[in-house]
Image: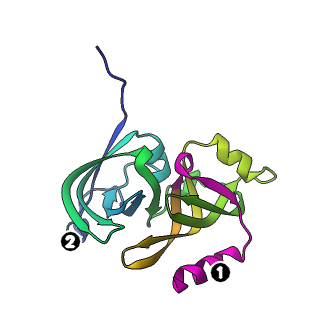
Amino acid sequence: MFSAATRVLRLAFVPPTKAAVSPTAEPLLDFVAYARDCTLAGSLLLSADRLTDLLNGSDELELVDVVSLGRDGQVDERERVVVARTDLLAVKAGDPRGNPALRHRTRQMPVMAGADGYLIHGYLHGRPGADPMIHLGRRPSMVPLTDATITYETARGWQRDEASTLIINRDLAEWIRPAKEDELARLHRGAGAA
């Protein structure tokens, strides 16, 4: 009996001291993933033009040398973790950005999203003249937002992380809606006051 084929992406997190002397031509990328009960962090070799493409092209991610911070405050280090893409609510992409040749002119729209206690604000990009929310439903599940903020509650209180690019899992979002520009300021005040 055959089981369903699974696309597995293997990511090796590289400690900063090793990253500085990496002989590869592929760029290193800071990587933070938000799951239901923890945050996973490290660096990885970007072996595709864009992190979004890498995530959408894999069903599972095999992570190596991972540090996780539970929302309960527990820190855990593991040599190897396999995470299903369907368990990732969002992924923070660091510099360098993806291949500049793949960028094109877009119209940006502020959006807010919520998933499992995470509140996200950022800019969704779509074709000029098109409704970005309609385009959102036609895209693969991992969707990038720019100039994004993600807030969530932990045992240490409210946390707020900012990202030039935050890739959200549209399929796990409980809701995504257009936002007003001033909602970001309210979001920041609310997270800071809690």
Distance from Cα at disc 2 to Cα at disc 1: 37 Å
Q: Nearer the viewer, mark 2 or mark 1?
A: 1
**Residue under pointer 2:** 17
Residue in view at x 46 percent, y 77 percent: 158
- The answer to which quarter of the image holds residue 111 is bottom right
Q: Position of residue 114 (x, y in %)?
A: 58, 60
Q: Is residue 50 visible?
A: no
Depth order, front residue of 36/131: 36
Residue extending farthest top? 1
Q: Position of residue 106 (x, y in %)?
A: 70, 57
**Residue under pointer 1:** 185
| Magenta run includes residue 127 | no
Residue in view at x 46 percent, y 50 percent: 49
Is 171 on the left-hand or right-hand side of 23? right
Give the magenta range. 168-194
Instruction: Tell me the crowding category of disc 1: few under 14, some 14 to 19, or many 20 or more residues within 10 angstroms, Cα based.
Output: few
Q: Amino acid at mark 1?
A: Ala
| Magenta run includes residue 183 | yes
Residue in view at x 53 percent, y 55 percent: 168
